[in-house]
Image: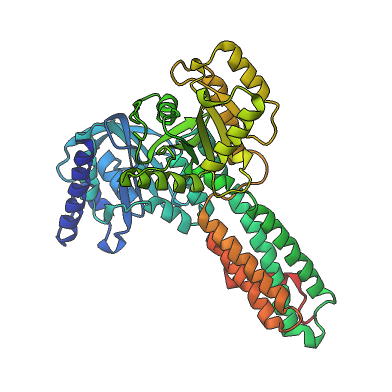
Amino acid sequence: MLSSIYHGIWRAAVHTLRTSRGTPSCRFLSTCDEHPVGLADADTIFALSSGHGRCGVAVVRASGPASVTALRCMAGLTRSLPPPRTALLRSITDPQSKEVLDRGLVLWFPAPHSFTGEDSVEFHIHGGPAVITAVLHALGSVPGMRPAEAGEFTRRAFQAGKLGLTEVEGLGDLIHAETEAQRRQALRQMSGELGRLYQNWSHRLKQCLAHVEAFIDFSEDELIEDGVLSQVDRRVCDLQAEMERHLKDERRGERLRSGVQVVIAGATNAGKSSLLNTLCQRPAAIVSPIAGTTRDVVETALDIGGFPVLLSDTAGLRDSPDLVEREGVRRARERVEQADLTLVVVDCSHLPSDAQQAAAFLQRRLSSVLPSQEQPETDRSLLVLNKIDLLPQEQRLKLDRELSRVSGLPPVCLISCHTNEGLQDFLTVLHSSVKTLCGDPLSGAPTLTQARHRAHLQQCLAALAQYQRYRNIDLALAAEGVRLGLTNLGRITGRVGVEEILDIIFKDFCIGK
């Protein structure tokens, strides 16, 4: 219902804008006449910046040269504007009918001290759909104003140099962050730490390129100091080593951004669906005593101690004549191959009583669930022994004690989805595994968060390898490798230019001294 209301609001605003644009004689009276804005300046945007839905306060933002006109017209400021970044309580009126639409706060952000770097205005109004509709209608009737496109305010901030591309991506991640760890990582990236790392590499590559270009152009005139190319060689090697270390992060940042893929797998009737329902605390999957109930992958998103997890329940692994079940098993194995962490669920009532025999049984079960690995990765899987409520207390304690001494097995957790026994200990182990896979977003060097960053850095390394390859064969081709590397770094940050390289040449070298 609300989505249709706001869709109607937006369509109404667009209709108002088109109507005003299609009427060249449309002019405002009174205060708006004192501050006319021509249609040539129609580059001022507006939008509802707060979340959709009924709320106490909604924020409508405008940015561009006509925003000051909208402020004067709609807030009745005939003489002077409010002090910058100071909230002022005003009656907000329709600039054409002069009808009072609401009473709220207005704020004025003069350029360049605003989010977009342009003159900007904010209207803090009551968050009812009718109020929002009326204010958007009124803004759409101001000459030179139009509804903003998705992300256009942030695009203008980037174009004005207020944000780099990595900071823009961090802002987007912060808006979409659902867990505490995601918030921390996004906030760190939005603060510019990752961008500064890449800018530092870009600056050093620019110096290398400038020195190589200067050597090519001026070395015959003996105007270049000796050892310039040796310095470039060392700097390129240092940069290659730093980038390679940065890339060897096991995709922690990307995993934290998109969520850890945790897959529940095992034989039929081991309690996989019960474990899914227990973890997400709702009946997400059908549970029955009939083997092979789950045929498809059932997914649910969880927050495990502040880390995002995408938990998947899969079909029980067994040979079956049923075509549908065989497809479910194929999908289950495919999902296990893609998993960051696999929870191998075993019905502990099927375990041999002897500890060594139980360990061998579990090893075979691991191999059947993780068939693509010659040696199952103990840091990418957990053994979950379910249904311990069916075992006598003495046998449980003995099993737990004996399995803890067996090497070569991943962490073993004894639980009962029926009684929730052992569940808290299992969640502690699961949280530890997920945290290891994601890392601490606040410690160490900033991590890669986007697949495009990784692709451009790999291309940058390939380009620097071209420099190494042609260094003693053709210096012009070697320089082209550095230039390509610099271009790929610039595609991450959004900033690279020829003028910067020329500046370094004339700054670092006394050409013609």
Q: Residue 200 is drawn in which quadrant?
A: bottom right
Q: Residue 79, how many percent across, how many down?
A: 32, 43
Image quadrant holding the N terminus, namely top left
Left or right: where 283 falls relative to 383: left
Seen in the picture, residue 105 relative to 446 is either above or below; the reply is above
* Residue drawn at the location 29% of the way across and 33% of the way down: 125
Residue 434 visible? no
User: In this view of the protein, which residue sits in the foreground, 452 or 495?
Assistant: 452
Residue 101 visible, this orientation: yes
Q: Position of residue 72 (x, y in %)?
A: 29, 44
What colour-coding does the image apply? rainbow
- State the quadrant of the C terminus: bottom right
**What residue is rendered at 34% in x and 51% in y?**
150
Q: Going by the image, does 275 lie left or right of 497?
A: left
At 64% across and 17% down in the image, what residue appears?
398
Residue drawn where x is 68% and y is 66% of the image: 205
Question: Looking at the image, which residue sits at the far right?
Answer: 226
Hey, which residue is sitting farthest bottom in the picture? 220
Q: Which of 42 and 293 is in front in this view?
A: 293
The image shows residue 446, relative to residue 350, as above or below, that is: below
Left or right: residue 213 compared with residue 123: right
Q: Where is residue 388 in the image (x, y as percent from the top left)?
A: 52, 19
